[in-house]
Image: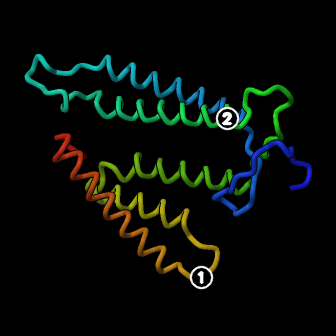
Amino acid sequence: MSGSDPAAPEVHSPFAGERAPVSPRADLLAAAVLLAFGLAVLALSLRMPTFAEQSGTGLTAPGIVPGFHGTVIALLALVLGLRAVRRGALRGGAPGPARAPRRQDALRLSAAAALGTLYAGFLVGRLPFWLATALFVFAFTAGFEWPRGPAGRGRRLAEAAALGLGTGWAVQLVFEDLFLVRLP
């Protein structure tokens, strides 16, 4: 890539097939933010009531799922931070060039935000939860895995449908039968 920092590692971009420079310092900064967020979620989940005084068990405490998510985010942030340090994030010198956001990146981000808003703001509560989840996962998967050419589109749609239905069923099963949470 012309004009790029030779010290910046090259990684494959899943979006356009190009290779884009990734700054280890950007990874380290992202890791710090994600670590703070994960630890904050974990701390707040530990402050939630356990309902032990009402014969509740540890598995029915409302802080279990957010605590799990906060823990996973914090652990993955540590992995990202360690990887960034190994790649030279703490070495002196000017940071490598950052890739300017492209229009396609902004469109993908907007599409993801629109699908999430449609799911949470419209589908959930108006449709059975399993169906709303299945439709969301199908639309998200089909939209972001759509091949450039017509070859393979039928297979991708079938995979997206199977993934959506499987996810809708699994989420319903896990939350209602395992966590005993009534879903809308």
Tell which of 155 and 10 is nearer to you. Answer: 10
Residue 44's image quarter?
top left
Residue hosting label 1: 150
Give left or right: position of 34 versus 70: right
Residue 161 picture location, percent across and down: 38, 69
Q: Quadrant of residue 132?
A: bottom left
List the single residue furthest toward the bottom: 151
Say what amino acid the circle numbered 2 marks: Arg
Contact? badges 1 and 2 (CB < 8 Å): no
The single residue placed furthest to the right in the displayed view is: 3
Q: Residue at x 54, y 52 (%)?
A: 112
Q: Which is more N-terminal, label 2 or label 1?
A: 2
Disc 1 from disc 2: Cα separation:
42 Å
What colour scheme does the image use? rainbow
Q: Which mark is residue 88?
A: none
Element under disc 2: helix
| 97 with respect to 60 (left or right) | right
> Residue at point 48% right, 30% down?
74
Residue 59, image x, y percentages: 19, 32
Residue, disc 2: 86
Residue 88 lies in quadrant: top right
